[in-house]
Image (cartoon, grey):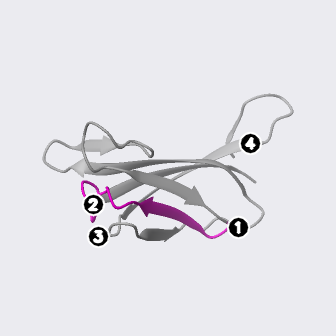
Amino acid sequence: AGVKLGEVSPALKVKVMSGTISATAGATTSIAHGLSSGNSIIGVMLAASYDTTNQGWVNPGYSAALGNAEVGALWNNTFILIKTSTTSSGVLGKAAKICIFYTG
């Protein structure tokens, strides 16, 4: 069904997934989202685990104070792509939580 944000707007749906970020710096992790081509992905939120002891999570684009936690999220018709950089050692091989907002 989804949630409508206005009388003439399409229904907004949400899909929550999880995965594991590649253990290799500079690698891309591909996670199939399972949405059909008739769905239109509006946005993706990613949280990457950087501290399993304290349950710490970081959003894409964050790189500073936590040290070595640089990560980003992209998507296409088939996959959510989690990209790390050479300064991503804090999130390599750790968990990722993904929230996809879509219509269709």
Which label sits in the foreground, 3 or 1? Answer: 3
Q: Amino acid type of disc 3?
A: Ala
What residue do we see at 81% from left, 36% from top? 9
Q: Which residues are magenta?
A: 77-93
Sequence-first tag of 2 and 4: 4
Sequence-first tag of 2 and 3: 3
Which label sits in the foreground, 2 or 3? Answer: 3
What residue do we see at 70% from left, 67% from top? 36
**Numbered disc 3: secondary structure:** loop
Sequence-first tag of 2 and 1: 1
Residue 86 magenta-drawn? yes
**Numbered disc 4: secondary structure:** strand
What residue do we see at 35% from left, 43% from top? 63
Q: Kindly tell me whether residue 100 is visible in this rendering.
A: yes
Question: Label 4 neighbourhood size at 10 Å, few (<14), some (14-19), many (20+)?
Answer: some
Residue 33 magenta-drawn? no
Question: Label 3 neighbourhood size at 10 Å, few (<14), some (14-19), many (20+)?
Answer: some
For disc 1, the marked residue is: 36
Which label sits in the foreground, 4 or 1? Answer: 1
**Above or below 44: residue 18:** below
For disc 2, the marked residue is: 94
For disc 3, the marked residue is: 23
Q: Amino acid type of disc 1?
A: Ser
For disc 4, the marked residue is: 11
Sequence-first tag of 3 and 4: 4
Q: Amino acid type of disc 2?
A: Lys
Which label sits in the foreground, 3 or 4? Answer: 3
